[in-house]
Amino acid sequence: MTDKTNNAVVEKTAEEAFDLAASAAFYKEHSTMQKNGVRVIKADDFHTRLADQHGISTADLKKIQNALTDERSAVALVAGEDLEEKIKAARAENKPIEDLRSLSATVRLPMLGMDEDITVLSSETTKIAKKAGEDGPTERLDYGVVTTRVTRHMSMRKPVVESLASRLARAMGVDQQ
């Protein structure tokens, strides 16, 4: 058996050993739903599961997160510099401010078997919900907004992503073909 074959067998065994349904049930039971509809998992629960299920200590996780934060920050800076060049070129062409506000720049950061797109938006308008005593929602204009988008399922299991797409389409009454 070659190393490559052996690694494939080990990876498959580790994948089969992970109980996805039990993990999802754990997170559902050990999390809270906020008023805004966001489910929040406690850091201690997540860190304990990483250690128990995958052998990743909190120190290991912190080291990885710090390294990725540094690298993502550098990539965001590159995207911002690319966007600044686009804005200067558009201004030189006397483009209207609406065109300038709609510009963005993206840099794709390769990960292991996936990509993360880091995008800098020249501006973004956010609607803020009505507060007590106000007439209606307000808007806030922010400049240099950084967003990230994970592509290729970010190491999520492809059947899970496909199943979610199918389940949600059915839940919405859409026939997906």
Image (spheres, grey):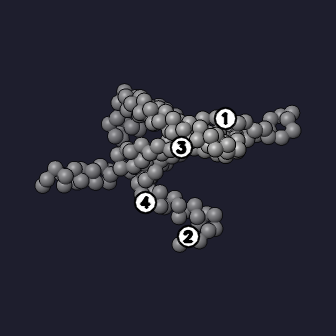
Q: Residues within 10 Å of mark 1 (few under 14, many from 20)?
A: few
Q: Residue at x 41, y 38 (%)?
A: 49
Which sits earlier in the primary sequence, circle 3 or circle 2? 3
Label 2 Cα neighbours within 10 Å, binned few <14 / some 14-19 / many ≥20: few
Is 12 rendered above or below residue 61? below
Q: Amino acid at mark 1?
A: Asp
Query: In the image, what residue occupies the spot 22% across and 54% down?
Result: 9
> Nearer the viewer's eye, disc 4 or disc 1?
1
Which kind of residue does numbered mark 4 sit on?
A: Pro
Along the line of sight, which residue is nearer the eye, 124 or 97? 97
| CA distance for labels 4 and 1 | 37 Å
Instruction: Provide the residue designation for mark 3.
Output: 105
Q: Toward the viewer: 10 or 22?
A: 10
Q: Residue at label 2? A: 176
Label 3 to label 2, Cα distance in Å?
32 Å
Give the residue pinned by disc 4. Answer: 159
Q: Nearer the viewer, residue 46 or 125?
A: 125
Q: Disc 2 marks which amino acid? A: Gln
